[in-house]
């Protein structure tokens, strides 16, 4: 009755493109495509319009007849991001999670939870995304989790220390 792999058209993936119109205007933005579909299906489909969101502008529908060229804008490879994950000099867990360094642990946990939902691999499992985008999303998920682990470590250490102090190491058995 219900298929978990099917996604309604309510959610869209934004594919970065440069649209050139027949009158020579080039606009950079995102081509909004329903999850589970790819750019080529949408461009060659029967629909007469494409949903497009120019950078810094509002979403609109563009007639396919007015488009002369669609160029996919290269998404940066995740290799650079993976290298930064290993570079601890530029690793600021507060900046990654978007919280100030004075934030409480509840705020840190809330920010982590929000970002973990955004970048979780299951969210994009049924979408046909370019490999670069999949690599980027996976790298960001690892980066967000690493930032949370760094900020959670002192709390976990204090909990472990408190638990070890509370439990006796040895209790003698009463003699009968």
Image (cartoon, grey):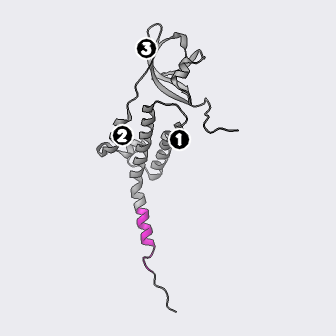
Work out whether 65 lies above or below 104. Answer: above
Q: Nearer the viewer, residue 158 or 169?
A: 169
Quadrant in which the N terminus is drawn = top right
Q: State which tag comes first along the sequence, 3 or 2.
A: 3
Instruction: State the CA–CA distance, disc 3 to disc 2.
Output: 33 Å
Q: State which tag comes first along the sequence, 3 or 1.
A: 3
Instruction: State the CA–CA distance, disc 3 to disc 1.
Output: 35 Å
Label 3, on which residue?
Answer: 26
Foreground mark, 3 or 1, reads: 1
SS at circle 1 = helix
Does the magenta run of residues contain 118? no
Tag of residue 122? 1
Residue furthest toward the top? 23
Q: Could you say where residue 145 lies in the image, as x and y percent from the top left?
A: 43, 47
Q: What stretch is highlighted in magenta?
A: 158-170
Q: Could you say where residue 133 lies in the image, as x and y percent from the top left?
A: 44, 32
Residue 56 seen in render: no
Q: Nearer the viewer, residue 65 or 62?
A: 65
Displayed quadrant of residue 153:
bottom left
SS at circle 3 = strand
CB within 8 Å, label 3 to label 1: no
SS at circle 2 = helix
Displayed quadrant of residue 28:
top left
**In the image: residue 124, left or right of residue 81:** right
Instruction: State the CA–CA distance, disc 1 to disc 2.
Output: 20 Å
Label 2, on which residue?
Answer: 82
Work out whether 126 lies above or below 105. Answer: above
The residue under the point 65% across, 38% down is 3
Q: Main secondary structure of the magenta part?
A: helix
The residue under the point 40% across, 28% down is 75
Does the magenta run of residues contain 162? yes
Foreground mark, 3 or 2, reads: 2
């Amino acid at each position: 009755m219900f298929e978990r792999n099917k996604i309604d058209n309510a959610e869209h993936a934004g594919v970065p493109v440069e649209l050139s119109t027949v009158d020579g205007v080039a606009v950079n933005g995102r081509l909004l495509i329903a999850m589970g579909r790819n750019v080529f299906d949408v461009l060659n489909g029967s629909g007469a319009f494409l949903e497009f969101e120019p950078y810094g502008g509002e979403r609109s529908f563009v007639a396919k007849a007015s488009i002369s060229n669609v160029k996919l804008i290269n998404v940066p490879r995740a290799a650079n991001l993976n290298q930064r994950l290993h570079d601890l000099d530029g690793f600021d867990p507060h900046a990654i999670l978007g919280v100030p360094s004075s934030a409480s642990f509840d705020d840190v946990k809330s920010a982590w939870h929000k970002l973990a939902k955004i970048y979780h691999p299951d969210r994009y499992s049924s979408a046909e995304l370019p490999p670069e985008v999949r690599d980027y999303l996976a790298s960001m998920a690892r980066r967000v989790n690493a930032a949370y682990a760094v900020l959670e470590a002192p709390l976990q250490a204090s909990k472990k220390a408190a638990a070890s102090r509370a439990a006796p190491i040895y209790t003698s058995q009463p003699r009968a």
